[in-house]
Image (cartoon, coloured by chain):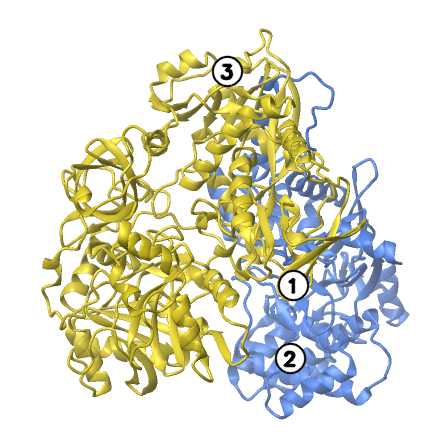
């Protein structure tokens, strides 16, 4: 039935105050859509532009609101940071004594969610859409990896495309077919309170209040209030899959709601005498990373998903629908939706136990401060390198990517870091000096970083099929001598990066491909869909077979040559080279002269059973060269100061090599056909509309000022030109470095114009961190002074590629 | 001087242990939810013992309390060994063969029991080899006997009790070349212990009891009130049947001397027990063993002393009485406790205190607004009050601790009096035994849903 799911119980708040950029865009679109819906369809939607006020009880909270305010403002959404006194003017019931500030978004709105659904359905029917209510889908039929139809209790429906929007049932529906589609979401009980009207009924135009520190939201509702929240101890539901058929109001649990009620009365003490109408308890589905799930299944073409709204369904609904529709019609959405793409998950996030534990962490996080570099604490230690215990014993602190544990940094013995809660900060973090010394060691001696999490594929064929198909799918020339490593993009037909990887040619007919950790599902699906259906062409995921050790630093050469009795100097082992050799007793170690940082060194791909041996040998031999362990934070600082972009953070399906200064990684002049070629040729001739640029913060005090993260607006001569995509402190420059894209918006029309080198160079730049602007120097090329040590011929990994 | 509440708590909680039957995400198919246990010493060292284990080769869980006398050696030995004897008695022939073959060829043994032990519950390392050999002889005999019939739990329990007591007696007669072990087996045999053991498998609950510890079932009536059902009979002078039994087993001439001052032969409180060979062996055997034994034994007046009017041994047996009970959904918990508890508390009170404690912790009656007119402020006040109430109950996380608190601290009104509790706990070691006995309690909580489901199947 339409709107019978969680929609029926939705609180109906449309709020654009979202920290993730793409979610913000979706909410913005939804708001505009709902506004005109009533007019277009004639169905009453209850749309009421009330505005919303997000309260801050702490300075840290205010900072996070200011960050959101910055990104709202540059999108043209009115928004301001206001004082507690102003809050009182806007909403007379609020107790402001414990507030430090608030954010006011005047255009946020309230709707009746069920009526919005009805209006949308009405509009759809008018355009020829058939809606079958009270029909249950038993499963989706898939043939040869394509959706062919849907089996329902009222018979079969043929179709090319199927969208699984089953909300909290999406997981089960995904598993109902022969070939399961994994949709990782899990339901939790979600409570809100309805009251009778006040003596003097509340005005329906009163703004919605969000008090994240109190974990509650409050809106006016028929003269009374509606108030719910995200408690610290959520109650997950239906883990066993015994799901109710139609959503019903679940058992009220006042004891559970108690803390939220306290928060409500603290915020609005005047409501003590207000009479309770009902405590509503409805299931809401949450996802493992707090972002919703949309996109096409990696295993079944035509099988689309839109679910897991994390209780913001009404805010996202309109925008999400728009992107999904574009996706189905055009083959791709008009915005980068990778952060929401179903393919960021694999089967590994689909365990019920994992989901149950993770959503119990996620739901309270909805109201927690979102600080940089936050790591989930549940569902951890799923995928680990064989060296995990060894590294852990040496003080490793871990983060997780796609289920894989990766080292952030190593805490030296004797030094203490803050505990989890106290380490949350927008300022200089407590690991600053630790990472600094790891970076120094990479620059002056040698460090080991375990990089086993990277996705590794092998592609081989009996004849030339492998080379031929790869030449078409990848932008750089792969017809290189055996033993060479090539950095290349895997582009879509619009020239955008679907993946950014390095490929080693192992033999005439086989290639070894390394891509970012979270590409495991996406890249596999892309290759499967694009490689010719040829049994002589074999694609294999070998991620689990190899442990990768990255030896970074000037002394890596010495360590490796001592362990292998082979000369490793640039003459014998030039940069971007790959060779199988012995290290210690272990033979068949794949050594590549890349480090993903621009520093000299090697990555060793070690068959896992040799991992411990090789690690021990390297550490023993390395001792006299001052070797130490390092983590990803050091790696990130190194690669960002070298202006290396990485996929998933800086690069996405809407970025072409031309836009990030990587023309030299494209075989435009070789006269070969490859995917995305036309767009690149056009850009080469007519120029690009955005340009990847490096910014060095000038007047930023590392100790005292807020740190940049990503998503900060960039201003050129006072005009907004784009956002940063990543940032790090450079220990070499002793400055913060931000990477981001610069656009050229026409001052009058807002139309995007060509961005030239001169445009970049002739501008005064500022970066806006939570409302405070810092001067920044823009650069299109990395500092050459950073490369003075041992430059190898001219083949240094210049402004190459990187990812995390 | 007074102990502060935290000090009292740390004394009461020192030996507490809880075990929850592991569940996988809300699914628990065991009829046992888990158990809480605790001990409060009066003797130094404490002479009570407790054990709990899950049978791994058959289904079911074993729980037991053991009250030692004349030292703790016998109770310790029984607490380590008895469950193995029971488990072996329950094993089917094929499994016994498999285990024997594994031992024979030096392969790894199938684990028989999974113990649930408090860190203070120890096993004797030195004697394990000796104990193992006795156990192995037992199962070898079971293999030879192979009756082919399926094992009856009642019989298995009786056999295990008798066999273990027999082995304790034999080991003391044979002795051991190692002087430490030799002294140990003698101390075990000359001291004594009662045993009260429960075996739970699905809805079948068996209680085997030897001596004066007690098992009691907590039943929740339809109106929510609590009542107690005895699942064991005390073997002491207060039990007419037991006095009758002892009199039947000995000539009429001894009738007057058998039970004096409510004690067996005027000496022993429990009428059945493990060990206590002084009440089982012939005088000649006792003299021979004591004389050939180590000096420590010879110097001990107690061991040398022969009970008066000792004419027709044995006077004592370890054979248990077994009661079988089919669990019903209203059977919420089982309390096993040594006489230290039952001396101070009536079973009806025990049922009420544990029952209220368990339900208080697990499901307070939920509030529903329904059609009433309730304001936010009223509801808030109500919830705050409820939270405060919960937190005071939560002082004890363990039902056994909660019970001990009442047993020791109850005043005439049946509520815990902190002053009294503090006084009782601060008694010096040598005085403590005058006011109270060692107390050992295990509270087993049943899973009514699973039990209900079993019932429906039948």
Residue at (44%, 48%) from the top-left corner?
A339
What element does badge 3 sit on? loop
Mark 3 — residue?
A: A206
- Residue A385 vertical position relative to residue A714 in the rendered view, above or below: below
Few, some or many residues within 10 Å of mark 2 (<14, 14–19, 20+): few
Mark 1 — residue?
A: A179
Disc ID at residue B110: 2
Same chain letter for marks 3 and 2: no
- Identify the hue of chain B: blue
Q: Nearer the viewer, mark 3 or mark 2?
A: 3
Name the foreground residue: A41 vs A560: A41
Q: Residue furthest top?
A: A200
Tell me how far mark 3 sits from mark 2, CA to CA.
71 Å
Q: Which chain is represented by yellow in the image?
A: A
Name the foreground residue: B146 vs A219: A219
Q: Position of residue B53 (x, y in %)?
A: 65, 66
């Amino acid at each position: 039935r339409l709107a019978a799911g969680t929609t029926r119980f939705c609180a109906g708040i449309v709020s654009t105050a979202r920290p993730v950029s793409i979610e913000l865009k979706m909410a913005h679109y939804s708001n505009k859509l709902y506004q005109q819906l009533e007019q277009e369809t004639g169905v009453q939607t209850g749309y009421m532009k009330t505005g919303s006020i997000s309260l801050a009880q702490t300075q840290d909270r205010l900072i996070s609101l200011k960050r959101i305010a910055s990104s709202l403002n540059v999108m043209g959404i009115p928004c301001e940071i206001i004082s507690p006194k102003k809050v009182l003017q806007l909403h007379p019931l609020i107790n402001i004594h414990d507030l430090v500030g608030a954010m006011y978004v005047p255009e946020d709105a309230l709707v009746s969610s069920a009526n919005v659904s009805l209006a949308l359905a009405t509009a759809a029917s008018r355009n020829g859409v058939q809606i079958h209510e009270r029909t249950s889908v038993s499963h989706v039929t898939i043939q040869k990896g394509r959706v062919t139809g849907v089996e329902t209790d009222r018979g079969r429906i043929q179709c090319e495309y199927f969208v699984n929007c089953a909300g909290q049932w999406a997981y089960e529906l995904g598993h109902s077919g022969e070939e399961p589609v994994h949709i990782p979401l899990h339901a939790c009980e979600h409570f809100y309170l309805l009251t009778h009207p006040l003596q003097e009924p509340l005005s329906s135009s009163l703004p919605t209040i969000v008090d994240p520190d109190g974990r509650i939201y409050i809106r006016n509702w028929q003269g009374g209030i509606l108030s719910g929240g995200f408690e610290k101890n959520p109650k997950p539901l239906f883990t066993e899959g015994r799901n109710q058929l139609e959503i019903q109001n679940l058992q009220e649990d006042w004891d559970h709601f108690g803390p939220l009620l306290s928060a409500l009365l603290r915020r609005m003490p005047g409501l003590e005498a207000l009479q309770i109408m009902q405590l509503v308890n409805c299931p809401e589905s949450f996802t493992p990373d707090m972002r919703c799930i949309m996109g096409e299944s990696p295993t079944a073409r035509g099988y689309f998903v839109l679910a897991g709204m994390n209780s913001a369904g009404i805010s996202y609904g309109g925008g999400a629908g728009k992107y999904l529709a574009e996706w189905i019609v055009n083959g791709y959405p008009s915005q980068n939706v990778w952060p929401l793409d179903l393919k960021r998950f694999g089967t590994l996030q689909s365990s019920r136990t994992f989901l149950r534990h993770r959503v119990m962490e996620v739901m309270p996080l909805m109201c927690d401060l979102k600080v940089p570099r936050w790591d989930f604490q549940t569902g951890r230690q799923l995928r680990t390198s064989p060296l995990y215990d060894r590294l852990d014993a040496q003080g490793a602190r871990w983060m997780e990517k796609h289920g894989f544990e990766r080292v952030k940094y190593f805490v030296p013995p004797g030094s203490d870091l803050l505990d989890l809660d106290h380490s949350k900060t927008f300022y200089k973090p407590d690991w600053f000096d630790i990472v600094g010394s790891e970076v120094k060691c990479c620059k002056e001696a040698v460090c080991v970083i375990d990089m086993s999490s990277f996705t590794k594929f092998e592609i081989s064929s009996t004849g030339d099929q492998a080379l031929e198909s790869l030449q078409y799918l990848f932008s750089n020339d792969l017809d290189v001598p055996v033993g060479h490593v090539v950095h290349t993009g895997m582009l879509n037909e619009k020239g955008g990066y679907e993946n950014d990887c390095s490929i080693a040619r192992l033999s005439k007919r086989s290639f070894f491909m390394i891509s970012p950790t979270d590409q495991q599902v996406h890249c596999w699906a892309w290759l499967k869909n694009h490689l010719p259906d040829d049994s002589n062409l074999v694609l294999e995921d070998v991620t689990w077979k190899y442990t990768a050790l990255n030896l970074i630093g000037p002394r890596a050469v010495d360590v490796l040559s001592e362990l292998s009795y082979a000369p490793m100097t640039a003459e014998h082992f030039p940069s971007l080279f790959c060779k199988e050799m012995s290290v210690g007793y272990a033979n068949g170690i794949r050594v590549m002269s890349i480090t993903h940082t621009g520093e000299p060194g090697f990555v060793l791909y070690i068959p896992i059973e040799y991992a411990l041996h090789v690690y021990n040998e390297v550490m023993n031999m390395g001792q006299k060269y001052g070797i130490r362990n390092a983590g990803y934070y050091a790696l990130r600082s190194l690669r960002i100061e070298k202006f290396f972009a990485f996929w998933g953070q800086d690069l996405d399906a809407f970025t072409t090599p031309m836009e990030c200064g990587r023309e030299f990684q494209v075989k435009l002049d070789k006269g070969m056909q490859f995917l995305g070629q036309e767009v690149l040729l056009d850009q080469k001739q007519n120029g690009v509309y955005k340009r990847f640029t490096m910014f060095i913060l000038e007047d930023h005090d590392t100790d005292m000022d807020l740190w940049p993260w990503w998503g900060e607006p960039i201003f050129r001569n006072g005009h907004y030109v784009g956002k940063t995509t990543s940032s790090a402190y450079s220990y070499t420059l002793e400055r913060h470095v931000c990477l981001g894209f610069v656009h050229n918006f026409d001052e009058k029309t807002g139309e995007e114009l060509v961005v030239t080198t001169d445009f970049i160079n002739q501008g005064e730049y500022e970066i806006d961190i939570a409302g405070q602007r810092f001067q920044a120097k823009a650069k299109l090329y990395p500092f050459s002074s950073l490369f003075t040590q041992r430059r190898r011929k001219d083949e240094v990994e210049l402004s190459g590629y990187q990812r995390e | 001087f007074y102990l502060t509440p935290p000090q009292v708590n740390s004394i009461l909680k020192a030996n507490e242990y809880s075990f929850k039957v592991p569940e996988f995400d809300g699914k628990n198919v065991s009829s046992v939810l888990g158990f809480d246990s605790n001990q409060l010493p009066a003797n130094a060292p404490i002479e009570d013992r407790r054990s709990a284990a899950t049978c791994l080769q058959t289904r079911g869980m074993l729980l037991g309390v053991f009250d030692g006398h004349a030292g703790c050696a016998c109770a310790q030995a029984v607490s380590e060994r008895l469950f193995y004897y029971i488990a072996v008695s329950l094993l089917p022939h094929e499994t016994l063969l498999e285990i024997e073959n594994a031992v024979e060829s030096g392969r790894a043994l199938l684990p028989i029991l999974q113990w649930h032990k408090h860190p203070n519950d120890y096993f004797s390392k030195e004697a394990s080899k000796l104990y193992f050999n006795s156990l192995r002889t037992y199962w070898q005999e079971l293999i030879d006997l192979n009756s082919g019939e399926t094992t009856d739990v009642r019989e298995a329990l009786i056999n295990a009790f008798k066999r273990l007591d027999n082995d304790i007696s034999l080991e003391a007669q044979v002795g051991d070349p190692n002087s430490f072990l030799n002294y140990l087996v003698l101390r075990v045999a000359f001291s004594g212990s009662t045993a009260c053991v429960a075996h739970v498998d699905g809805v079948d609950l068996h209680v085997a009891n030897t001596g004066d510890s007690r098992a009691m079932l907590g039943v929740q009536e339809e109106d929510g009130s609590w009542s107690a059902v005895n699942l064991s009979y005390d073997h002491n002078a207060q039990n007419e049947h037991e006095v009758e039994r002892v009199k039947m087993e000995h000539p009429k001439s001894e009738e007057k001397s058998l039970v004096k001052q409510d004690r067996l032969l005027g000496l022993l409180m429990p009428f059945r027990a493990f060990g206590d060979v002084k009440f089982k062996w012939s005088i000649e055997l006792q003299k021979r063993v004591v004389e050939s034994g180590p000096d420590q034994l010879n110097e001990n007046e107690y061991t040398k002393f022969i009970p008066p009017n000792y004419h027709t041994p044995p006077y004592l047996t370890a054979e248990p009485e077994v009661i079988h009970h089919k669990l019903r959904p209203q059977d919420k918990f089982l309390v096993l406790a040594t006489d230290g508890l039952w001396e101070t508390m009536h079973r009806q009170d025990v049922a009420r205190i544990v029952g209220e404690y368990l339900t208080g912790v697990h499901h307070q009656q939920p509030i529903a607004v329904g059609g009433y007119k309730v304001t936010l402020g009223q509801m808030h006040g109500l919830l705050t009050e409820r939270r405060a109430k919960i937190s005071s109950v939560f002082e004890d996380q363990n039902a056994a601790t909660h019970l001990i608190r009442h047993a020791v601290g109850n005043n005439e009104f049946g509520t815990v009096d902190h002053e009294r509790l503090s006084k009782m706990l601060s008694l010096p070691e040598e005085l403590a035994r005058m006011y109270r006995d060692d107390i050992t309690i295990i509270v087993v909580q049943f899973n009514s849903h699973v039990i209900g489901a079993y019932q429906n199947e039948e």
